[in-house]
Amino acid sequence: MELYRNQRVLNLSIEPLEDVWLLIGDVQGSARHPYELSIEVKRSPDGRVLEWDSDCTCPVSIQCKHGVALMIKAAYKGQQILGTSAPAPSFKPLTEQELAAQRQADLAKRQAAAQLEAENQVIRWLGELERGGAKAPLAAERSGQNLRHEQFLYLLNVIAPQGPHPLLTLEAVVSYPKVNGGWAKAKPIKTMPGSGQPVFDLATEADHDVLQLMHTMPSAASSYFYSYGAKSRVTVEGKYGVQALELAASTGRLLIGDKHGQPTMPAQWGPPLDVLWQWHEVTQAHTDDSAWVLRARLDHSMAQLCLNSPPLYLDAHRGVCGLARVKDMSLGQVAVLLRCPPLKTAALKKLQAELAERLGAVPLPPVLEPLQTLTGVTPTACLHLSAVAPADVPVSGLMQATLRFDYAGHRGWWVGQGTTVLIDNAQGRLLLHREPQVELEAITSLVQLGLSATGNGIFGIPGSAAQQLWLQWADSDYAPLREANFDVTLDASLSGWIQHGEALDVRLDAQGDDEATSPWFDLSLGMEINGERHNILPLLPELIKMAARSPRDAATGLPDITPFIYLPATSGGFIRLPTDNLKPWLGALLELVGDRNHDFAGDSLKLSRLDAMRTTAALGEGAVWQGAQHLRELVQRLHGCAELPEVLAPKSVNASLRPYQQQGVNWLQFLREYGLAGILADDMGLGKTLQTLVHIQIEKDAGRLTHPALIIAPVSLMGNWQREAERFCPGLRSLVLHGKDRHEVAGNMMDHDIVIAPYSLLHRDRERWLEAQWHLVVLDEAQNIKNANTHAAQVASELKSKHRLCLSGTPMENHLGEIWSLFHFLMPGFLGSQKRFAELFRTPIEKQGDPEALQQLRARVTPFMLRRTKALVAHELPPKVETVMRVELSGKQADLYETIRLGMEKTVREALDAKGLAKSQITILDALLKLRQVCCDPHLLKLEAAKKVKASAKLEQLMAMLPEMLAEGRRVLLFSQFTSMLSLIEAELKQRGIPWVKLTGQSQQRDALIDQFTSGQVPLFLISLKAGGVGLNLPQADTVIHYDPWWNPAVEAQATGRAHRIGQNNSVWVVKLVAQGTIEERILALQDRKAALAESMYSGAVGRKQPLFSESDLAELLKPLST
């Protein structure tokens, strides 16, 4: 706008075409001369400007401020070409008459241009004639004004002819022949017709073609020149540039410009010339060293080489230009060669191989002597192996491999030095043509074998974990490397690097004179190497770590490691150990390392008696054993490899032992003989109490019962122990410590053979128990200490006794941590620390279903656990029939269940989101309790909504079938987890006149209640699951009803065992009442899973691969009521 306001727009002309208007004008800018502009404007039919494109001679060239000024000028003149926003009216188109007149004027212009060209042709001919003869000046004088007619000329100029990158340019100019010969000063072509250069009207067809081709040059700017958009000078480039140059030469008006850019002599298009390269010796100042430079010349010519694309030449002496041919070389390479600096002779000689490889067709400097050439030779890949320093092992591994390539005796590493290398040897200099592909294949083979480069031609296997690979190769004389076609040589330090171990020699010696009672043993391990025994104990930690990282064999449970391992020898090198003899040891040794810090540096390893037994149990074939004969016999007996000696029951015992009971007594005596402890885990009803009493009686008769046996039992079983002792072993003096008067009789407890006390008094009377010395401590229903963190479990572990025994039909009810707790009481440290036990066994078995870990744990505990199921004595028991009786909730009871379920599901989900599963146990158990209560009877819930529900489907079903059972003469035990449910049942029984007795934890005169049922006074016994699930002998019953299912199937099975046991003469009918489609049905599924885990612990069956209780279990338990 400023240019327009300052009246810098000097002129404006408008040429309307069909759909494009052309604006042409001059705008005075900052330069001395005005800028020339042309603008194309595309318009819509309604006069709106669609787009416009300007071309200016200013440096910006396009869409510049000068174009904007010209557009504004056109708008304010009233030519509306800028669209609806312009302030001027629309442009007035030409009429038919005006268009006809315009066409007539154009025709006249063309005719005048043709006439002028014809005249110029005559003038040029006359000028040549005049220069050729004496009368030329006269002719020129007469020609007068006509000889000054301007015409097209094309000038050839070389830009930077002495520089590193000379270029040939072509320029279109205007000039005229001078009278005295030559040409007047050339002027650049103006960018517009009608600017004092009528030469545009005289352009020939060839000129049009040349100008059009010049327009295609990348160096041409976009500027309107009729239909050509070109500058007057361009750099000749590409095939169109060559065509333009040839065509310009064909016009006869192609001239060579001088250094001022003025025309001189004509030029013609010549034949292609080859570029030749020559070395020239030069002398450098301040040095005596000679140097050489590379120069290019054209074959048989003094022409100038121009690095256009394609290369061109210009011979100013002969007036010829044309193509320059450069063989097998790019334009960039030619430019680099032309910039060749002076190269010293010494450097050229040293780098002769690189010159020969890279110069290609360019000759070598003459100062270099011809070389002997070695080509077409396939190299041999040579590997030299040597041991590395310990500090370098993380980088290279145990060894490093030096790779060299041998070409007919010439050996070296030339990777990355080019395909041609110069070798200096005794015979002189040799030019070697390498085979890079063959070398690359050899390097690739090394990489595929696991090696990686650590230096030039140096390879290794990084990391200490890879040392076994090196050692295996060394043990096989590096067969993998040789099979990969490497020529392998060894450093002298690798001689005898691998020593082979032979038979394993094991020595286990007791510390002290009496092996049978010694608490400590010394273990030493040796192996024969070259006929000599070597101590391999210091090598074990490395071996044990390897075993810890290895998977386990599914069949054997042993570490799945390679047949041979290689361990560092104290004298240097490595020892190869056969692992078949060592595998059985590794599990036991691994735990020794994990449980405590053992000193493996000495000649022997100090082991406790339990650790020695554990290690001895891992004895494998092929080992030579010495010492500890007594201990090894013990291990064989524990694992059933030897028959246990029979110990007959004393005549004072008033019972005939069944065969399996006699085996139990033998086992208890065996454990006592060797100072061991164990779990008698027979099913309920198989006589655990009797077997224990017989064992104590044997101890007394043998004179070993110098202190009492302490029996810790649930309160409900204390009376049973006293009765059984009086019945079967009347020679044993028993004392029950319970109640407030226990302190009065506790003072003479050491005068008895058996002291019976409840678990509740362990912590309360802690000092009394810990001050005493006991011959035997028996924990009946030992699952009471399944939580090792309870006071009872902690006090029990501190008791002073020679022997310990656990009695439990269900040593594991929920998880493996309970097994650990029992063995922690029996033999502290036998299963390691609680944390270590979780790492090795509990987590892998319970959460991952790991069969290998399960197998290892079973192998550990089985020798110290004697378990016989009722299936073993099935021929001595009547049949047992189990029936699941499903009862459907309906009406308001079903509605109440669903209402409680929805509320509890929301509460549990919020707790899980906020605190996670572990910290939400109270909320979860409360939710599940409420659902179970609804199933049993709505009156169990302390909610207003529940009070309005009168229906109780399970209670109605129970009261429908009980009278029939009793009418058939059945004797019934009815169990429930809820004592309040038993109270509701009592009310119904009272209303129907059915006699019963009830036993709960609050019941007084427990024995009297039991007698009423066993004597036949009443046919129905209501029992709370917690109070009467264990310790009752009720073979008089033939029917067992479980009113509500409990989480743990073992608890239910124990309750059933009150009736289905030794002494039962009738078949037993077990009825389980379950509310259909409710949480009770899902409890049954959970019972199956817990039973599977317990069975896998006892029998070795693999449990399911999932934890015992998860969020998915909760989702299942809290499902809507279904049918």
Image (cartoon, rainbow, N blue to C red):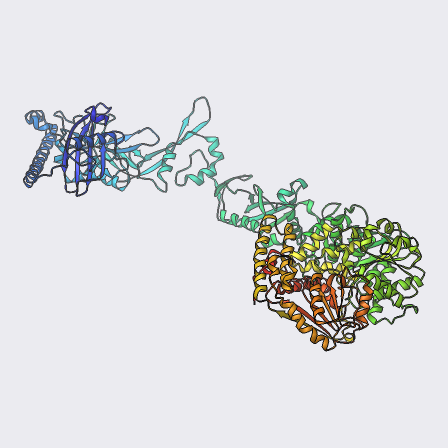
Report the quarter where the N terminus lies: top left
User: Percent position (x, y) of residue 1008?
Assistant: 82, 66
Report the quarter where the C terminus lies: bottom right
Q: Residue furthest bottom?
A: 968
Q: Is residue 576 visible?
A: yes
User: Percent position (x, y) of residue 39?
Assistant: 20, 35
Which residue is more in the foreground, 940 or 1030?
940
Which residue is more in the foreground, 1081 or 375?
1081
Q: Is residue 65 left or right of residue 538?
A: left
Residue located 93% across and 65% down the image: 731
Q: Is residue 185 above or below residue 465?
A: above
User: Percent position (x, y) of residue 824?
Assistant: 78, 53
Picture quadrant where residue 246 is located: top left
Q: Is residue 470 above or below residue 277?
A: below
Which residue is more in the foreground, 643 or 1110?
1110
Q: Is residue 193 left or right of residue 841?
A: left
User: Percent position (x, y) of residue 267?
Assistant: 21, 34
Q: Is residue 874 above or below residue 1094?
A: below
Which residue is more in the foreground, 441 or 626?
626
Q: Is residue 647 above or below residue 529?
A: below
Picture quadrant where residue 305 is located: top left
Report the number of discs: 0
Q: Is residue 1095 visible?
A: no
Q: Is residue 609 left or right of residue 236?
A: right
